[in-house]
Image: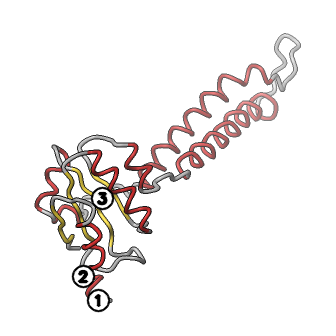
Amino acid sequence: MDAQRSVYGLMAEFDSANALVEAARRTHAEGYRSTDVFSPFPIEAAWEAIGANDKRPQLFILIGGIMGMLAGFGLCYWVSVIAYPLNIGGRPLNSWPSFIPVTFEVTILLASLAAVIGMLALNGLPMPYHPVFNVPRFSRASQDSFFLLIEAVDPKFDRQRTRQFMQGLGATEINEVEP
């Protein structure tokens, strides 16, 4: 158990985006779930292949939007009906059509703030250090190399069997990621 925890995981390098996507599909089909992919440009098929379909960002944005809508409408209602009720031109105090612009703007404001804060929280940012930076070849991830990482916390992870599996994926190089 300690031997498996002495590494963060195993990282395989591939020479093309198609090879990375195929390897990610096979890895997910094999049952590995604590995986990640790294590439110089976004590859949506690779994210889909590893099962990265998190619905929490949409939930954060929806909740932020609903809170913004309630806050904007509540502010207008409180000001016009409770705090400073002024009867101008015989209109009702709760004239909701005039509340719509403020309600819309506050909805958009809080939804966008929830999106940014949720993105930072779910991505684990700020993260000035990550163990993958200990692999010397990983500096090529932003230029021309494609990497697949299987983390040691995965229940199916076994250092030798996982290495053999990754060699069968057609990786050009496999590195142990030190914590």
| Kind of residue indicated by mark 1 | Asp
- Please give the label number shown on residue 127: 3
- Kind of residue indicated by mark 3: Met
Q: Residues within 10 Å of mark 2 (few under 14, many from 20)?
A: few
Going from N to C along the chain, the mark reached first, 2 or 3, is 2
The crowding category of the residue bearing disc 3, from other C-alpha atoms within 10 Å (few below 14, some 14 to 19, many at least 20), is few
* Residue drawn where x is 42% and y is 56% of the image: 50
Whether residues under marks 1 and 3 lie with C-beta atoms below 8 angstroms apart, the answer is no
Looking at numbered disc 2 in the image, what kind of residue is underneath it? Ser
- In the rendered structure, are the residues bearing label 1 and label 2 in contact, judged by CB atoms less than 8 Å apart? yes
Please tell me the numbered disc located at residue 6: 2
Q: Which residue is mark 1?
A: 2
Residue drawn where x is 81% and y is 27% of the image: 85
Q: Is 76 drawn above or below residue 101 in the view shown?
A: below
SS for dot 1: helix
Q: Nearer the viewer, mark 2 or mark 3?
A: 2
Q: Earlier in the sequence, mark 1 or mark 3?
A: 1
In contact (CB < 8 Å): disc 2 and disc 3: no
Q: Position of residue 23 (x, y in %)?
A: 32, 57
Dot 3 falls on a residue whose secondary structure is loop
**Quadrant assignment for the N terminus:** bottom left
Question: What colouring style does the render use?
Answer: secondary structure
Which quadrant, please, contains the C terminus? bottom left
